[in-house]
Image (spheres, grey):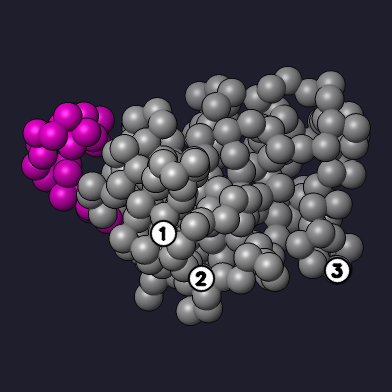
Amino acid sequence: MDILILKNIKKMYDDICVLSIDSLSIKKGTISGYLGRNGAGKSTTIKIIMGIITPNQGEITFQNEIMDYKNPTHKKYIGYCPDYPAVFDKLTVIEHLNFMAYLFGLKNPKQIETKIEKYLKHFEVEKYKYTLIKNLSRGNKQKVAIISSIIHDPALLVYDEPTLGLDPLSIKQFKSMLTEYTSTGGTVFLSSHSLDIIEEIADTVSIINDGEIVKKNISVEQIRNSLTSVEDYLISVVEGRE
């Protein structure tokens, strides 16, 4: 089943089309990599999915319902993390995570506490729970942002370069979090220049170039079986050799 479907999406700025997607679908329970060079349209696509910007035309279907940008109730079921720590600097870690949990509709204090403790332990940041976020390192702020994205058990996680600022151990923790999440039916749409991460955990990749999707849902296993890497495959596609 496709959890997310984009159809005939166009985004214009001053009569210049910066994004034109005829169709793109994401299957439930998978990790889908979204690749392309800088300025290709990855972040624009993600911002449209998240309702941060509105397309000039087209529609997005999420869980069999067309997204309504004037009443974005779908956001309750999506977790999002951009390439910077989208957190409240003046709150402590525990205050921020409690606030995010209540914002997404979680009501049971014990359930919230259990979830927060689980992810703080997973990312080894328990000792910072009462620390003001503004006093954390860039990497630890990003960990808090990642925890915020998954705290409400969303149906879909949307990530735009989420591992920027993370050290190798934290990246390993991030990958294991996603593997556990998808094993229970969660879905991930992941844009990243860290192609080794994509190659290790993604099921499929789609490639965007100059605002248009040029490859859709290509199996990572298929790429491996062709005796090449995701990195080499991406380069060959954007250079027009594939």
> Gap between marks 1 and 3, in whole Å?
36 Å
Please report the residue visible at 32 percent of the width from the left and 62 percent of the height from the top: 23
Q: Which residue is mark 2?
A: 62
Q: Which residue is mark 3?
A: 107
Query: In the figure, 113 relative to 163: above or below?
Result: below
Please report the residue visible at 69 percent of the width from the left and 22 percent of the height from the top: 138
Query: In the figure, 62 relative to 190: above or below?
Result: below
Amino acid type indicated by mark 2? Phe
In this view of the protein, which residue sits in the foreground, 60 or 146?
Answer: 60
Mark 1 or mark 2, which has the lower sequence index? 1
Residue found farthest to the front: 15
Q: Which residue is mark 1?
A: 9
Q: Considering the image in quadrants, where does the C terminus appear?
A: top left
In this view of the protein, which residue sits in the foreground, 6 or 154?
Answer: 6
Amino acid type indicated by mark 3? Lys
Query: On the picture, is 135 further left or further right than 236?
Result: right
Q: Considering the image in quadrants, where does the N terminus appear?
A: bottom left
Query: In the figure, 67 relative to 173: above or below?
Result: below
